[in-house]
Amino acid sequence: EIVLTQSPGTLSLSPGERATLSCRASQSVSSSYLAWYQQKPGQAPRLLIYGASGRATGIPDRFSGSGSGTDFTLTITRLEPEDFAVYYCQQYGSSPRTFGQGTKVEIK
Amino acid sequence: QVQLQQWGAGLLKPSETLSLTCAVNGGSFSGYFWSWIRQPPGKGLEWIGETNQSGSTNYIPSLKSRVTISVDTSKNQFSLKLTSMTAADTAVYYCARGPFYDILTGSYMGFDYWAQGTLVSVSS
């Protein structure tokens, strides 16, 4: 089982600032089958990034993903008010499909 | 537009069996894996397992002895059964589409459509 560790646990930033979220895997993620999701309270997660760097349909270009192997990053270039949420990484290249524990991006 | 709609009992007693069903509307059922994920209150996401249109399944090892995911292709539905429920199984349960190979992008995708979730509480 691939264990994903996200850091930091909480990120306190102001609107307009840049957010950098990290996801580290316990072993290499096959073919960069790494996704990022955004979840707001009371809602289902929303797919942001697939294949480590592909933006899902309708996702603004301020969201970008990068990385390969065991180290991945989600960057939000300029935080909008609606971006304050919890973000999860997930590897889906091998079973079980595992999630990181989440990073909360909160308003400073 | 693809929509997933799920239903099932939300309040169970210890030792009872959870039964949830997810219907897929507005899209093809074949060519995808269909997954169940849960989220305990205030905690993170946990993938439970998946099936495809041929009934092939994968499960998380920690639940494998208690979980069954089945598919009904005639109705474009898939279902989750989890036996011997305890308070530790209290969570919001989601069904979702994925993972799958997307012909349009030429990429293997994550979970792109999710249902609204069902809060399942286990209490005596």
Image (cartoon, coloured by chain):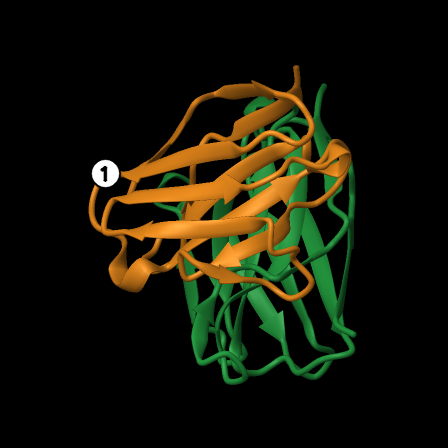
For the point 57% across and 83% down, the residue is B30
Screen quadrant of the C terminus of chain B: top right
Chain letter belonging to callout 1: A
Left or right placement of residue A18 versus residue B9 in this view: left
Screen quadrant of the N terminus of chain B: bottom right
Please, is residue B24 above or below residue A37 in the view? below
Q: In which image quadrant can residue A55 be found?
A: bottom right
* Number of marks present in the image shown: 1
Q: In which image quadrant can residue B18 be found?
A: top right
Left or right placement of residue A16 versus residue A32 in this view: right
Q: Colour of chain B?
A: green
Report the front residue among B12 and A36: A36
Looking at the colours in the rendered structure, which chain would you say is drawn in orange?
Answer: A
Please, is residue B56 above or below residue A83 in the view? below
Residue furthest to the top: A108
Q: Secondary structure at mark 1?
A: loop
Q: Amino acid at mark 1?
A: Ser
Left or right placement of residue B2 versus residue B42 in this view: right
Count neighbours of disc 1 (C-alpha within 10 A) and say few if under 14, some if 14 to 19, many if 20 or more: few
Q: Position of residue B35 (x, y in %)?
A: 55, 58
Report the front residue among B43 and A28: A28
Q: In which image quadrant can residue B26 be found?
A: bottom right
Report the front residue among A4 and A19: A19
State the residue position of label 1: A26
Report the front residue among A47 and B123: A47
For the point 75% across and 41% down, the residue is A43
